[in-house]
Amino acid sequence: MKPVTVIVNAGAGTGHDEAACATLQAQLAGAGLDANLVQAHGGAEMIGAAKQALQDGARLVAAGGGDGTINAVASVMVDSGVPFGVLPLGTLNHFAKDLGIPLDVEAAVRNLATGTPVKVDVGEVNGRIFLNNSSLGLYPDIVRDREKQQRRLGRGKWPAAVWAALAALRRYPFLSMRLDVNGERLARRTPFVFIGNNAYTMEGLAIGERARLDEGILSLYVAQRPTRLGLLRFAFDALLGRLGQERDFDVLTSPGFDIDTHRRRLLVATDGEVTEMSAPLRYRMRPGALTVLVPPADNGANPR
């Protein structure tokens, strides 16, 4: 039996109630895992539970939920050396998909027991980590508006997203920025900036996915000046975790760069969660900082 802590987002997907947790506990025991299952509400509880698990000497800490949940728990696990497990219980589950972790819960539980630990990169902006991506401009503006509509008007996530995207389309917002990257200073005026932890595929059936998470680079995509229709397409591509074609973007790669604007504070999205940060934004790569369990057939360097 292997002592582990599994932190579950009680609001992930359609929710994770007591019955679902009992089923998960049985699956963990069936896989040979002596698991302490913790139901957490919100990022602060998840982070606190992860810190407590490390203090208690857990040999494996896993997170069950969507990409926001995975990010919250992983932020504690970075540089700890303790293996991190992923149970993809959310809607999109980009991190799990890109690492080849099964989306079926029972198979993902088995991966906690039999998976191979590999080191993967994480990105960081002003001290906040991201496993998938970060963005500025259009996307965080839409997410913040969507969340307000969900709270105040009681709209569902996707109807609220549609209305928020249409509102952004009417505003047609642009961001003027100065970018220091690879020894150069560039000036850009753009509605949408996307920063990926490693490079994203921008063509074919695998668009919006990553083939590797261990190359030690950040990928920077700066949208060229699109039409309003192009803005709308960017909005929905961002909400679904996809990118457009390479011709729509200036594309750069670097282990780190700085972004500054005339604004003192900016809305910044990291793995779908929006935070207000002070400029300048300092993006850095942290190579191999997170140890993740992946299926044994994968080597982590190329999870496909």
Image (cartoon, helix red, strand yellow):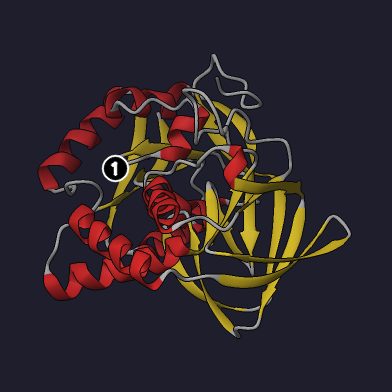
Quadrant, the N terminus: top left
Side (left or right) of 53 relative to 27: right
Q: Secondary structure at mark 1?
A: loop
Side (left or right) of 100 relative to 102: right
Instruction: Give the residue at the far bottom of this rendering.
Output: 264
Mark 1: give few (<14), some (14-19) or many (20+) Cα within 10 Å. Answer: few
Residue 53 appears anywhere in the view: no
Q: Quadrant of residue 108?
A: top left
Residue 242: where, in percent of width, then height? 45, 41
Residue 293: where, in percent of width, then height? 52, 31
Residue drawn at the location 16% of the way across and 57% of the way down: 156
Residue drawn at the location 64% of the way across and 69% of the way down: 126
Residue drawn at the location 19% of the way across and 42% of the way down: 21
Residue 64: where, in percent of width, then height? 34, 44
What is the three-letter code of the residue carrying label 1? Thr
Instruction: Give the residue at the far front of this rendering.
Output: 227
Residue 10 in the image: above or below residue 297: below
Instruction: Give the residue at the far right of this rendering.
Output: 183
Side (left or right) of 51 relative to 281: left
The residue pinned by badge 1 equals 91
Residue 218 in the image: above or below residue 100: below
Residue 276: where, in percent of width, then height? 49, 76
